[in-house]
Amino acid sequence: MPQPLIRIALTGNPNSGKTTIFNQLTGTRQKVGNWPGVTVEKKEGEIFKLGYHIQIIDLPGTYSLTPFSTEEIIARNFILDENPDVVIDIIDASNLERNLYLANQLRELDCKVIFALNMADVAKSRGYKIDAKKLSQLLGVPVVFTVGNKGQGMTELLETAVEVAQKPLSIPEERRVRYSKDIESAISELREFIRSQGDVPLPYNQRWTAIKLLEDDRIVKDRIKEATGGKSREILNKTEDLRRRLMSRFDDEPEIIMTDERYGFIAGIIKEVMSTSTFQRIDMSRNIDLVLTNRFLGFPIFIFFIWAMFQITFSLGAYPMEWIDAGVVGLSTLLDTLLPSGMLEDFILDGVIAGVGSVIVFLPNILLLFFCIALFEDTGYMARAAFLMDRIMHLIGLHGKSFIPMLMGFGCSVPAIMATRTLESRKDRILTILITPFMSCSARLPVYIVLAGTFFAANAGTVIFAVYLFGVVVSILSGRLFRTVLLRGEDAPFVMELPPYRMPMIRSLLIHMWDRSKLFLKKMGGIILAGSILVWALSSFPKESRYSPVYEAQIARITGAYAARIQTADPPEAERLKLEQEELIQKLSLAKEAKRAENSYIGRIGKVIEPVFQPIGIDWRGSVALLTGFVAKEIVVSTLGVLYVAEGDAESEALRHALKRSGITPLSALSMMIFVLLYIPCLATVSAIARETGSARWAVFNIGYTTAVAWGMAFIIYQGGRILGF
Amino acid sequence: MRLSQMREGQTGRIQRIGGNSRLRRRMLEMGLTPGSEVHIEKYAPLRDPMELVIRGFHVSLRVEEAAEIEMEP
């Protein structure tokens, strides 16, 4: 017989230790996904205990259930519409007053609630004593003490939850939140009116509905319209009358008055259940902040932390990256010997393995980065970083927290875009995602090194720096533009808690890190794989060009001619001839490959789109290189190598000579660098954008916008430069 | 006097909260209610935002948001 199912929802303020308790309750048996339609993380866990199949859903951390932010709407709708058997509200015992606000909103919802007074040890050390029995009595809600990071109270919490789930809901009328006389009478009048309308199918409990209507709750109003049809108009009109009456009575909006009265109710409870001893321990957190957000030290320390995060992510990450790279190379060498050469081999080696390899190689970076971010978040430093940077970020219309993702963009846009998950407001998140790709990622650097190194030899460093700076400027300007045109609307209030510093738990850091990295691997893998196979196919077919036989004949002729000469020559002369022969054959093979590439589908596409790139000084070879750069920016250099008939890598002298001979001028090289800086981010980034914004539309928009900006800027630079006579 | 005009280390009581309804609501829900005591812990290095201590916890506000809060004289 299957065990009966109990569904438990966890709610609580941010920083109340909710995630820790969730991890304690469910262990590692977690399912991480997104809430439908939004990119807020949804976590679920399942356990079999006490004879029940217990499903635990971790709702987003919120301060209230007023449906303003996405998180609040998710949490409230889940409780209202999914009817979990029990709601456990995690309350930070060291911060009882504010935490009771959400707790009371839950009680008003008429769901079965349990309070977990968490971090009881911290509260005690601060000199707070809480009378749990009295609290439970006064509010009519079971109360359990827990210490999440030590796993204390978990069994009792589960037992209480199971017990409550089986009992009928009962909050005695006299234990409810009471408002002042005027508001209570407005509530009863509205209830009376709704009742007088006859058989109105209200979606939710009547008192709560009346309260929410008086608070002008957008979502409840919509639901009433859906549920009651024609009668909603009268109900909403009546509501407006009552709201106007209350407004003239209090000279303020009813929702403000009611919030205030809820805090009044809470203050009364606090007086009864909490005693503060005069013994005050030193507040560690405050002392740490004396240094970390100090007027003079704050920024240097912040810059140091960011520097350290970069070092860990990209320098430390470089070692495992090398191993993975070596592994990928090793695998393809192995397969090279095992598989018969031919199309299948090409497909597996150059298409599949190269494609998957190009993604998996980022894994160490991603793991380390998310570890650092989890560390910032779990210790409470993230809020301080936002506190320090907000002034600067606010200039672009962004929240202080946007700084970290944008900075990460210099490393790699993919983790940077995923790091925007720390932003609460959806608009801020989208805006940050859209401008982050302009921060020049490390994969673009090889392109600059080749072009700047070749055409601006002495000033290469300065030119590259200027290109980076240009990216930052474009990103800021785009931010301002989007804020005023696309993502308009008032800024989300900055009002942000600076939670006390906490010792992070390694287990929770690891879970955090792995959850996010898993998503990266799963989703990116598929798209990248498909994309690289497509580019591989376009660039390797057709296999032969019209000129292939000509080159082959030439190679055969040279081989024959040299073979005869080598045979007759004395040993040192034969050595010299052999080298000469190899050199000639190599040259011909490269030329043959270049002709083939020109004739391949992607080469033909390059020729077709050449007119588009001509005004910015890029020929068909450059166009093809830029096209292949869509898969990954590093590829631009190797494609240039193939097309300009030379061994292609950033250090290669041969490529530099070939580029110099090819008619590229310093001006068109600069134009190309600017284009590479700004145009379509790579495939991995585009799919990250689609995923993190929750819509392919933003990804398409980003492709269009970046490419248009890139072309526009390159055009101005190239044509402007020509007019100026460069 | 407005909250934004207070100096580091000062303490005062909130009299009234203005601003658009979303901001007011958010501030109220964080416990910045009329009558509650606010201590100005510090201003950020760039003088914006500011850090307050209220009801025993720390919260940061932008100066422009703090300008909407009228303090008791």
Image: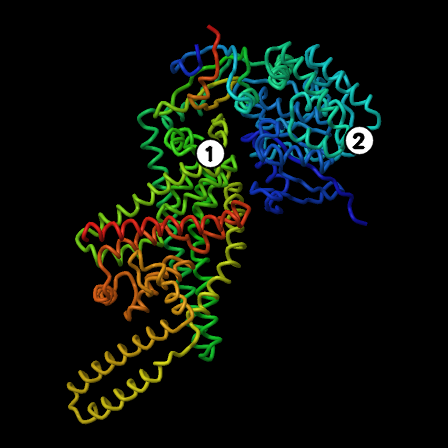
Measured as percent of width and height from the top left, residue A647 is found at 29, 69
C-alpha separation, residue under disc 1 versus residue under disc 2: 48 Å
User: Pointer 1: what residue?
Assistant: A379
The quarter of the picture where residue A287 lies is top left
Q: Amino acid at mark 2?
A: Pro
Q: Are marks 1 and 2 in contact (CB under 8 Å)?
A: no
Residue nearest the viewer, comparing A264 with B15:
B15
Residue nearest the viewer, comparing A282 with A400:
A400
Who's the residue at 46% across and 66% down the image? A353
Q: Is residue A95 visible?
A: no
Residue nearest the viewer, comparing A534 with A319:
A534
Measured as percent of width and height from the top left, residue A154 is found at 65, 35
Q: Amino acid at mark 1?
A: Thr
Residue A322 appears left or right of A164? left
Disc 2 chain ID: A
Residue A104 appears left or right of A19? right
| Residue reaching furthest to the top | B73
Disc 1 chain ID: A
User: Residue A201, labelled with which disc?
Assistant: 2
Binning the other alpha carbons within 10 Å of mark 2 as few (below 14), some (14 to 19) or many (20 upward) gives few
